[in-house]
Image (cartoon, helix red, strand yellow):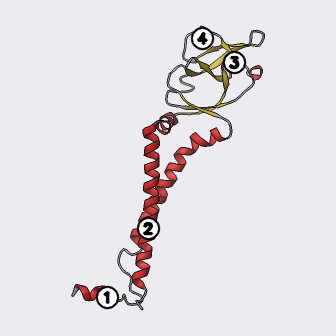
């Protein structure tokens, strides 16, 4: 009895149950996964493409203005154009630090800086050569995403997640093709 059913054609107007729903669900899920990977990569990649530096805040020296776990966007700037009150990012040894400018000492070619949460000014002046740029924007909580995408395991997860989205879209296409093939009469 079962072998007879395989060779029967589906009557016109009769639709197989799940013939369109499952491919549609696979397609929606795959598309949502791909869009989520793209959307989470954009805040990290697009600013870099237009010349901004993107850094993760790991200390509380600029709280509450810039909390731990924030991402800061740093635009290259000329040292002479930096004003008192501007937040700058600068290289200090192996670290990048973002602090507020207390004084731009143009004659000495240095900045006097201070973290908003610190009681006093920084002990060492920041030379113009150490300046990375001016902090133009910061977004709380995006720092964790930056850490994820800059780590090897995070990159692997993003690639695997995107691959799953692509495979769901491919599966949806194959399921639709199979449903079309079942609907066509055999010659």
Q: Earlier in the sequence, mark 3 or mark 4?
A: 4
Q: Is residue 18 above or below residue 101?
A: below
Task: Provide the residue designation for mark 1.
Answer: 7
Q: Earlier in the sequence, mark 1 or mark 3?
A: 1
- Quarter holding the N terminus? bottom left
Q: Nearer the viewer, residue 185 or 13?
A: 185
Callout 4–callout 2 Cβ contact below 8 Å = no
Q: Report the label total.
A: 4
Residue at 55 percent of width and 20 percent of height: 94
Relative image position of residue 117 (x, y in whole percent): 54, 17
State how far apart marks 3 and 2 are (Cα): 55 Å
Q: Nearer the viewer, residue 152 or 101?
A: 152
Residue at 43 percent of width and 45 percent of height: 157
Task: Provide the residue designation for mark 2.
Answer: 172
Q: Secondary structure at mark 4?
A: loop
Residue at 53 percent of width and 19 percent of height: 61
The disc at residue 122 is 4
The disc at residue 129 is 3
Q: Earlier in the sequence, mark 4 or mark 2?
A: 4
Relative image position of residue 6 (x, y in whole percent): 30, 85
Classify mark 2: residues with Cα within 10 Å, few (<14), some (14-19) or many (20+): many
Q: Quadrant of residue 5?
A: bottom left
Relative image position of residue 37 (x, y in whole percent): 50, 49
Q: Nearer the viewer, residue 102 or 51?
A: 51
State how far apart marks 3 and 4 are (Cα): 17 Å
Q: Secondary structure at mark 3?
A: helix
State how far apart marks 1 and 4 are (Cα): 83 Å
Q: Secondary structure at mark 2?
A: helix
* Disc nearest the viewer among 1 and 4: 1
**48 lies left or right of 141:** right
Residue at 65 percent of width and 10 percent of height: 125
């Amino acid at each position: 009895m079962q072998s007879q059913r395989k060779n029967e054609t589906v009557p016109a107007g009769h639709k197989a149950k799940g013939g369109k729903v499952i491919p549609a669900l696979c397609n929606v899920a795959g598309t949502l996964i791909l869009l989520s990977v793209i959307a989470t990569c954009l805040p990290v990649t697009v600013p870099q493409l237009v010349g901004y530096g993107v850094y993760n805040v790991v200390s509380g020296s600029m709280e509450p203005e810039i909390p731990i776990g924030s991402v800061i966007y740093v635009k290259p700037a000329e040292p002479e154009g930096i004003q008192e009150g501007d937040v700058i990012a600068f290289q200090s040894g192996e670290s990048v630090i973002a602090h507020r400018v207390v004084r731009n000492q143009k004659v000495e070619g240095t900045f006097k800086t201070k973290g908003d949460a610190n009681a006093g000014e920084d002990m060492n002046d920041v030379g113009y050569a150490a300046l990375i740029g001016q902090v133009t924007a910061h977004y709380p909580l995006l720092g964790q995403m930056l850490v994820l995408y800059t780590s090897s395991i995070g990159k692997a997860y993003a690639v695997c997640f995107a691959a799953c989205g692509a495979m769901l879209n491919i599966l949806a296409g194959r399921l639709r093709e199979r449903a079309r093939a079942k609907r066509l009469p055999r010659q």
